[in-house]
Image: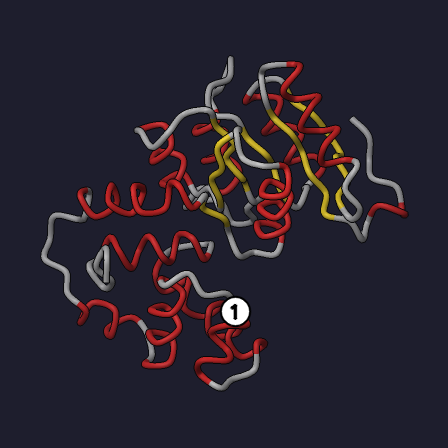
């Protein structure tokens, strides 16, 4: 385990966690050769991934789901779960399609999901997106994950009034646009506001919802019936 050198501090710092040595080495090499991205550590199981991430505080942990000693879901919960005050962002990389593993990782606090057969450019974009706090959900998974979210909605009746109880009108506007997949820049253009203003509103809104990422905010909107699937 090594501390980053001064010339890597401006880069997106990544820890790669995967129990397959070839996959781990391949991901590390691919990411490490991309300008502006530095792989600061590798882990072969969930316990090592948590220890390394807490020691190095990377911008992103690329996390496999099935690993020995501690699976990726449990490791994700330790790094960025609801009870973590200073979370480390996690991007789930999995060979598994939408299932309990994937949805469990979402509930554990992961900021993004990507299948391992994604194109290298997609992976690089996902790492940068998660590091920037914007999250990432593979297009092939989006509707299926959200449909699963909808089927698992909370049992108590929830309507749009729930959001108006928690959020200001402007925060609600931003949440609805966020649920459409808009970036901060696109939301700012739609509402004729500065990007910094959008970020400030999101920073205030997410604690009210009990979430720590944009992706979790979108899930909250679907889970509570604020946005309907297919709307």
**Residue 38: x and y, percent?**
77, 40
Q: Is residue 162 left or right of residue 208?
A: left
Judge by depth and name the residue closer to the eye, 4 or 183. 183
Residue 105, compared with residue 202, is above or below; it is: above
Q: Which residue is mark 1?
A: 184
Q: Name the residue: 58% across, 76% down.
A: 196
**Residue 52: x and y, percent?**
67, 29
* Residue count near mark 1 (Cα–Cα under 10 Å), binned few <14, some 14–19, many ≥20: many
Q: Name the residue: 70% across, 34% down.
A: 55
Q: Is residue 193 left or right of residue 43?
A: left
**Residue 2: x and y, percent?**
82, 30
**What colour-coding does the image apply?**
secondary structure
Q: Answer with the quarter of the image where residue 133 lies.
A: bottom right
Residue 196, compared with residue 17, is above or below; it is: below
Judge by depth and name the residue closer to the eye, 138 or 70. 138
Residue furthest out toward the bottom: 192
Q: Answer with the quarter of the image where residue 83 lies.
A: top left
Residue 27, compared with residue 7, is above or below; it is: above
Tell me the element at label 1: helix
Judge by depth and name the residue closer to the eye, 95 or 171. 95
**Residue 33: x and y, percent?**
79, 36
Q: Name the residue: 50% across, 48% down.
A: 136
Q: Answer with the quarter of the image where residue 63 lies.
A: top right
Q: Is residue 87 left or right of residue 210?
A: right
Q: Name the residue: 75% across, 28% down.
A: 29
């Amino acid at each position: 385990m090594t501390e980053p050198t001064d010339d890597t501090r401006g880069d997106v710092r990544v820890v790669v966690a995967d129990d397959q040595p070839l996959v781990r080495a391949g991901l590390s090499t691919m990411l490490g050769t991309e300008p502006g991205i530095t792989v600061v550590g590798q882990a072969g199981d969930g316990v090592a991934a948590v220890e390394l991430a807490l020691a190095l505080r990377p911008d992103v942990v690329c996390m496999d789901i099935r690993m020995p000693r501690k699976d990726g879901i449990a490791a994700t919960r330790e790094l960025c779960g609801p009870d973590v005050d200073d979370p480390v962002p996690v991007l789930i990389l999995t060979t598994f399609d939408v299932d309990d593993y994937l949805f469990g990782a979402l509930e554990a606090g992961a900021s993004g999901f990507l299948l391992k057969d994604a194109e290298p450019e997609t992976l690089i974009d996902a790492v940068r997106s998660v590091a920037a706090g914007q999250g990432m959900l593979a297009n092939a998974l989006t509707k299926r994950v959200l449909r699963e979210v909808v089927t698992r909605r909370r049992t108590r009746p929830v309507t749009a009034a729930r959001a108006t109880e928690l959020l200001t009108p402007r925060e609600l506007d931003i949440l609805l646009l966020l649920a459409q997949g808009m970036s901060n820049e696109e939301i700012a253009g739609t509402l004729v506001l500065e990007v910094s203003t959008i970020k400030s509103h999101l920073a205030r809104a997410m604690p009210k919802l009990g979430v720590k990422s944009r992706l979790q905010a979108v899930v909250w909107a679907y889970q509570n019936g604020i946005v309907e699937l297919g709307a």
